[in-house]
Image (tube, rainbow, N blue to C red):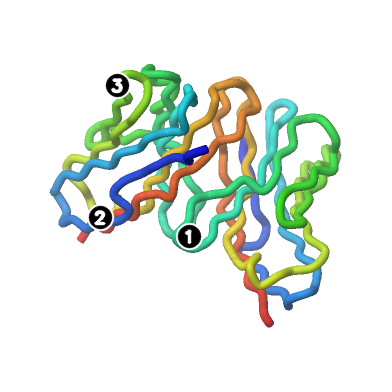
Amino acid sequence: AQSVTQLDSHVSVSEGTPVLLRCNYSSSYSPSLFWYVQHPNKGLQLLLKYTSAATLVKGINGFEAEFKKSETSFHLTKPSAHMSDAAEYFCVVSDNNFNKFYFGSGTKLNVKP
Amino acid sequence: EAGVAQSPRYKIIEKRQSVAFWCNPISGHATLYWYQQILGQGPKLLIQFQNNGVVDDSQLPKDRFSAERLKGVDSTLKIQPAKLEDSAVYLCASSLGQALDTQYFGPGTRLTVL
């Protein structure tokens, strides 16, 4: 069975400082993993995805994530936060057979000026 | 490329009333999904279509929810009768329908049941 745990419901950082959003997954086999971002009143937008190629995945807007099988983690990072990064972020694990997504509960990122 | 379209964007109804949501996926996308996102939670899959056939509806409350995807393109999701706990954002997503595909999401319909 597939599941995702996002370890922090809220993260607050100052503009220009690093961002770390944590995600642990559980999967019966080699998973595909995604990070999506949801800005208020907007649809979910794909940030990046891991599909068993390079373990360090680069996404849009300077975000990246590293797949660590030994730790069953897929944490999202960004070196320097921008005010526009304030949003809710969802970690997702996919059932590769049917392309079924399992969402985490989300992490709300607040960026302080 | 046009994205996933949904309407209406907002809907307010009273409990026991009926409501319907519409979704137009990205052209050429074989797989269509309906999700329910309750405030403070991640989206939960309600139903998944592959073309006009149902792949998974295990979490759809079938006593009150129904969905169809006639002709394998547009889809409608209906709730009849609505309950207070149905207040949520209903998201539609689509993908090409192959393994490891990215799902593309619409803006959602925010339903408030009073």
Q: Earlier in the sequence, mark 1 or mark 3?
A: 1
The answer to whether any part of residue A1 appears in the image is no
- 3D distance between C-alphas at marks 2 and 1: 19 Å
**Disc 3 element:** helix
- Write down the residue under mark 3: B70
Tell me the residue that label 1 is attached to. B40
In which chain is the residue bearing label 1?
B
Where's residue A77, x and y in %?
A: 78, 57
- Residue under numbered circle 2: B11
Whether labels 2 and 1 belong to a single chain: the reply is: yes
Q: Mark 1 belongs to which amino acid?
A: Gly
Residue occupying image coordinates x 71% and y 70%:
A82
Please say whether residue A108 is visible from this viewpoint. Answer: yes
- Choose top left, top right, bottom left or bottom right for residue A9: bottom right
Dot 1: within a 10 Å radius of its alpha carbon, few (fewer than 14), some, or many (20 or more) residues?
A: few
State how many labels appear. 3
Instruction: Please tell me how crowded label 2 is: few (under 14), some (14-19), or many (20+) other residues with Cα within 10 Å.
Output: some
Residue type of the residue flagged with mark 3 = Leu
Q: Earlier in the sequence, mark 2 or mark 1?
A: 2
How far from the left and from the top, in percent, is residue B17? Answer: 14, 48
- The three-letter code of the residue at mark 2 reads Lys
Of badges 1 and 3, nearer the viewer stands: 3
Vertical position of residue B27 compared to residue A39: above or below: above
